[in-house]
Image (cartoon, helix red, strand yellow):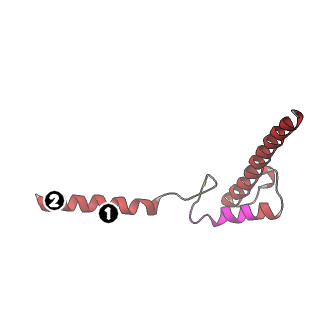
Amino acid sequence: MIRILVAAGALALAGFVAAPANAQETFHGYNCTDDCSGHEAGYDWAARNDITDEQDCDGDSRSFNEGCQAYVEEQSDDASRNSRFDDENDNEDSDE
């Protein structure tokens, strides 16, 4: 009976240890199929070319396009945050 418990515990532990290796890797919220290199290439390309419209992310590779889209989304989020910050500063300046 003890051997069965030890074996069951060892199997459970082995499954737990192996689980993180099978975890899906992501890149800015997009699921990667392997190592995210396609996503990184698309993101870097978009950054180098100052892409601001997701419609410009229309290559042959899904992962490349998703990386490009991630860049556009990030730039849009940054612009939105900066706009809110500028509005807050304008409101503070008008109180003087």
Q: What residue type is labelled 2?
A: Ile
Q: Nearer the viewer, residue 43 or 63?
A: 43
Q: Name the residue under label 1.
A: 14
- Left or right of 35? Residue 96 is right
| First to last magenta residue range | 34-44
Q: Would you place residue 74 above or below residue 49 in this image? A: above
Q: Quadrant of residue 31?
A: bottom right
Decide whether residue 25 is among the magenta residues.
no
Residue 29 locus on image (x, y percent)? 62, 52
Q: Which of 51 and 61 is in front in this view?
A: 51
- Left or right of 23? Residue 32 is right
Q: Residues within 10 Å of mark 2 (few under 14, many from 20)?
A: few
Q: Name the residue under label 2.
A: 4
Q: Nearer the viewer, residue 62 or 25?
A: 25
Q: Residue at x 87, y 38 (%)?
A: 93
Q: In which quarter of the image is residue 64?
A: bottom right
Residue 92 locus on image (x, y percent)? 83, 37
